[in-house]
Amino acid sequence: MTFDVITIFPEFFRSILDHGLLKRGVAGGHAAIRLHDLRDFTDDRHRTVDDRPFGGGPGMVFKPEPIFRAVEALKAEGEEKDFPVILLSPQGRLLTQAVAEELARQPRVVLICGRYEGVDERVAVHLATDEISIGDFVLSGGELPAAVLMETVIRLLPGVLGNEESSRQDSFAATKVEDGNSHGWLDCPHYTRPTEFRGYKVPEILLSGNHEEIRRWRRQRAIEKTWRRRPELLAGVALNEEDRRWLESLQHAAARL
């Protein structure tokens, strides 16, 4: 099994790969872990991987172009192109033992490690085949979740633990959104330059300069994403009247399908 890890901090993984189960899996020939510096896929002399978010707000957002180039370069290496491309994100489905077992059946997996405020939504929608989270908390980047995911999966590969029974007996065989920051539910989508990439356009509302409409759009998208992906999170969130009307409209639309 091969893991291709796309990151701006490949050195983060050096010590992890020199110790413990990941080292054992690689040294034993059960898995290969290849590190790819995202900055190697930029096209400017500053090796820029991020830009300011459209619509305002704090932080920087990973640009789509370098990430698309990195994944496409990996797909061009061989005949096999239908492998999982996973974006490590707090907005993804939760990493569970069942998910690990699902991934352990794959010959190759690509992991995209985000940083800063987030990753341009076009990566999640048009490139990644899955988004995975290791829990309902926020980290500075996707490197640590990538390491957690790889260890969770590699320990399931035959021969890594030595005793097959070891893995079989393991366990598991928002209150508000302001200025685009989510608390209690999943985050809203983020976009950065360019405004159009391969025909995929940034939502017009984020280019409008209307801060109230942008705030409302972000809040509604956060509620919608949470309802579709992690509906249990909404149970502990106090929704205002506008939020409830929006959620009811989503539920009614889904019921008509």
Image (tube, rainbow, N blue to C red):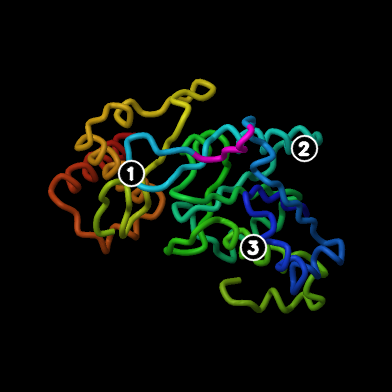
Residue placed farthest to the top in the image? 199
Q: Closer to us: mark 2 or mark 1?
A: 1
> Under tag 2, what secondary structure?
loop
Secondary structure found at label 3: helix
* Quarter placement of the C terminus: top left
| Nearer-N-terminus badge (2/3) | 2
| Position above or below: 141 against 213 | below
Mark 2 or mark 1, earlier in chain? 1
Q: Residues within 10 Å of mark 2 (few under 14, many from 20)?
A: few
**Mark 2 or 3: the one toward you:** 3
- Residues in magenta, as a range: 45-50
Tell me how many marks there are: 3
- Check disc 1: other Cα within 10 Å, few if <14, some if 14-19, many if 20+: some
Q: Residue at x 61, y 58 (%)?
A: 146
Residue 74: x %, y % from top left: 73, 38
Quadrant placement of the N terminus:
bottom right
Which image quarter: residue 46?
top right
Where residue 183 appears, x then y in whole percent?
A: 31, 58
- Give the residue type at disc 3: Ala
- The residue lying toward the viewer, choosing from 41 and 22, is 41
- The kind of residue on which mark 1 rests is Gly
Among the 4 quarters of the image, the one containing residue 219: top left
Give the labeled residue for mark 1.
57
Q: Position of residue 205 (x, y in %)?
A: 29, 29
Q: In terms of secondary structure, what is the magenta stretch mainly?
A: loop
Mark 1 falls on what kind of element?
Answer: loop
Residue topped by disc 2: 80
Residue displayed at 47% across by 23% down: 196
